[in-house]
Amino acid sequence: MWRLFPQKNKYVQEEAEFHFDPAGNIPKHVAIIMDGNGRWAQNRRLPRIAGHQEGMETVKTVTKHASKIGIKVLTLYAFSTENWKRPTEEVNFLMQLPVDFFDKFVPELIKENVKVHVMGYTEFLPAHTQDAVKRAIEQTKNNTGMVLNFALNYGSRAELVTATQAIVKKAQAEGVAAETIDESMIADHLMTGFLPVDLRDPELLIRTSGEERISNFLLWQIAYSELFFTDALWPDFNGELLEMAVASFQNRNRRFGGLNLPVADEHQVTE
């Protein structure tokens, strides 16, 4: 884990100074929990919806920068299955945001060769939100660059329940033996299953606003993700901070439960 702290309106590293290497190891899949829109607005004595509006501008900035530095998949946690508990006025505004966002930003996404995907229980979204999502997906379907994947009305526990139900139905219909159910089968039934196998799991998970929680996001997929927390509120996040998060990733030693030992020392490993 690595995090940034605010100092004199800038974000500086707590420990060692890492520098982003554009020719270095770029995480193929980056996921972001976009948090802090409401606090950003409240700090300016603005209504919370002003923070969400500004947050959408940040999505545009970060999307283009992520594509520029070579990220293959950018998954953004836009609206959770729990967010329906918020005040009706705020929820209604959030349901309108994809309409405004896609109508204005899709031409730029096409120019940037970015392909839109939306995962989540979209069938429960208002009709106008569903229509905007479908249009964006259709209009960018031939793009071959970065995948911009929005998690919209998404919750990871619900996703796991849905995947389990689908596997049970498959087992009942096709006589699938219990011992043949493995990690690969489960991954195929998750909402990231549309991605190539090597791109399904985020290598880097970023959360803004200073909170250090996963908040029911990609619980299966982030089993070995590197975690990066910043106190920057989402509307203040930008391309430079994205690069700093990637710089942190580039300086991690990812062992996946094993040991990275010099070849001469490998015989010493007994467990």
Image: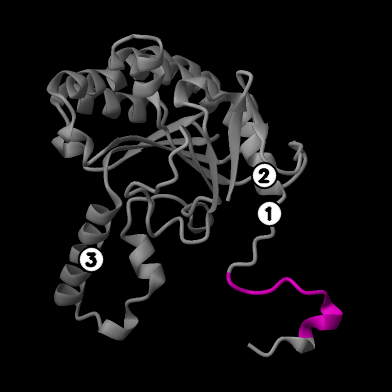
Which type of secondary structure does the marked residue at label 3 adopt?
helix
Residue 165: x and y, percent? 18, 64
Residue 140 falls in which quadrant of the image? top left
Question: Dot 3: few (<14), some (14–19), or many (≥20) neighbours within 10 Å?
Answer: some
- In the foreground, 243 or 74: 243
Q: Which mark is in front, 3 or 1?
A: 1
Quarter of the image where the C terminus is located? bottom right
**Which residue of the protein is positioned furthest toward the front in this rendering?**
8
> What residue is pinned by disc 1?
252
Residue 197: x and y, percent? 48, 58
Q: Name the kind of residue labelled 1 in the image.
A: Arg
Q: Which mark is in front, 3 or 2?
A: 2
Q: CA distance from mark 3 to mark 2?
A: 35 Å
Residue interval drawn in magenta:
257-266
Reading the chain from its start, which is encountered first: label 3 or label 1? 3
Q: CA distance from mark 3 to mark 1?
A: 33 Å
Q: Are marks 1 and 2 in contact (CB under 8 Å)?
A: yes
Q: At 18% across and 71% down in the image, what residue appears?
A: 168
> What residue is pinned by disc 3?
164
Numbered circle sitting on residue 248: 2
* Residue 29 appears in the figure: yes
Q: Name the kind of residue labelled 2 in the image.
A: Ser
Magenta stretch holds residue 153: no
Report the side of 117 relative to 16 (left or right). Answer: left
- In the foreground, 175 or 84: 84
Question: Dot 1: few (<14), some (14–19), or many (≥20) neighbours within 10 Å?
Answer: few
Which type of secondary structure does the marked residue at label 2 adopt?
helix
Q: At 63% across and 74% down in the image, what residue appears?
A: 258
